[in-house]
Image (tube, rainbow, N blue to C red):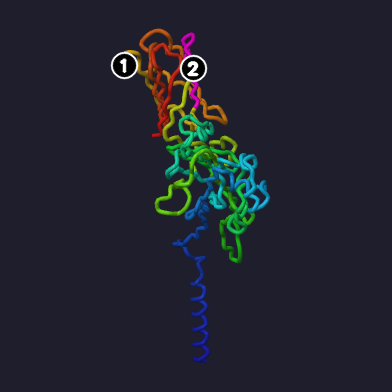
Amino acid sequence: MKRLLAILIAGAMAMTLGVAAFADQATSGDFTGDGDTTYIATDVYSVLLPTTLAWDFILDPQGLVGAYRSGTVGSENALASATPEQLAPFAGKIIPGTAFPVVQNRSSYDVALSVDIKVTGDAVVVASASSVSPASGEDGATANNVLLEVDIATAAITSNIVETAVTTFPASTVSQTLDDKGKSLSFVLGAANYVFSATGTPPVFSYARNADSFGNGTALQLSGEVNKNADWSAFVGDAPTTKKVGIDAKFTIAKATEEDVAIASVDGAYGFKGVGMFTAKPTAAAALTGGMLTVTITAAGDYTFPAESLTSFKGVNAAGNTVTFANMPAITRSSGNAVMAFTLAASWGTTGANAGWTELELTFPSYVVVVTKASAAATTATVEITLK
């Protein structure tokens, strides 16, 4: 009996303890927990940029390379019997080489590309085709003149240039001429297509470039003209004393700003934003009629004025005094060429201290334009543009 009673008591205690373990009798409680964060950075930088490249080109003053490659002279041996008439169309050319830079943006965002190019070496750099091969007796008729141009692909390079390689330069191009000061070309290259994905259970999330999107890029090559009447023998060979013609190019990449993205391509090339100027001395026409002064500036060569807003301007009158003006003129750039024109309000007119101005200085974020007249009464002007 005592044993049975002990068992019953033990069972009762177990049942009592089991009931006490449930929380439905609690009047308060503290809870803690850790949240899991799922986040993937969507700023992915990936740009294919030339780091070691022999950006080559061939000077062909006699037209030998051009005629041979074209098949005009038939074969290598046929050069011996080539006539001047057969060589003439090819003489004086700069032939693009087989190596040229391609920059492709495979990032998840647009990038701004700047290419700063300068001509190096011993040749005389000219900026217009009419100055390359002057007629006999004219200045520079026998000088080693070169006119180097940068050809830019008009369409985006969207192929997989790592696997397929770009061995043939795009057929459709526009060109920018290099002067003796150099030139800075600006581009905005569009982003590649990126997508989210999930794999496995539980899912592992990722953000990667779409397999069908290889990015958007541009390609550059060098071409141009040389003086076909000059003696180029000093430029032949690899001796230490051999004269050279070369280029120095620097490629710089940065994430595009909202302003960069908003600027449309100009002059027909994919992603092309404009040309930075070092120093140029273009010409300008100024007409003063009815109190309205209209100045049209046309840059020498094929310079392009960046699409910037005027930040300040001032003038100098005939007495040499600096005068300032209350209203800044609107600046516009004609599409596809190097022209900007502005009209100054009537307050700049024919009376008062501002009437006899001889110099105007217009300041932009990246360059300064100085318009100078020979006299207060002159209706034409010279212009100097300086990159800051």
Q: Secondary structure at mark 1?
A: loop
- In the rendered image, residue 311, in percent from the top left (x then y), is placed at 41, 27
Query: Looking at the image, which is closer to me, 42 or 78?
Result: 78
Rendered image: mark on residue 294: 2
- Residue for point 57% across, 31% down: 336
For marks 2 and 1, the one nearer the N-term is 2
Q: CA distance from mark 2 to mark 1?
A: 22 Å
Rendered image: mark on residue 364: none
User: Does any portion of residue 172 appear in the rendered image?
Assistant: no
- Residue for point 56% across, 56% down: 207
How crowded pointer 2 is (Cα within 10 Å; few <14, some 14-19, many 20+) is rated as some
The residue type indicated by label 2 comes to Thr
Rendered image: mark on residue 321: 1
User: Quick check: is 293 in the magenta stretch?
Assistant: yes
Instruction: Please determine whether, in this image, residue 353 is positioned above or below residue 218.
Output: above
Q: Tell me the quadrant of the picture where the C terminus can be found.
A: top left
User: Does any portion of residue 156 appear in the rendered image?
Assistant: yes
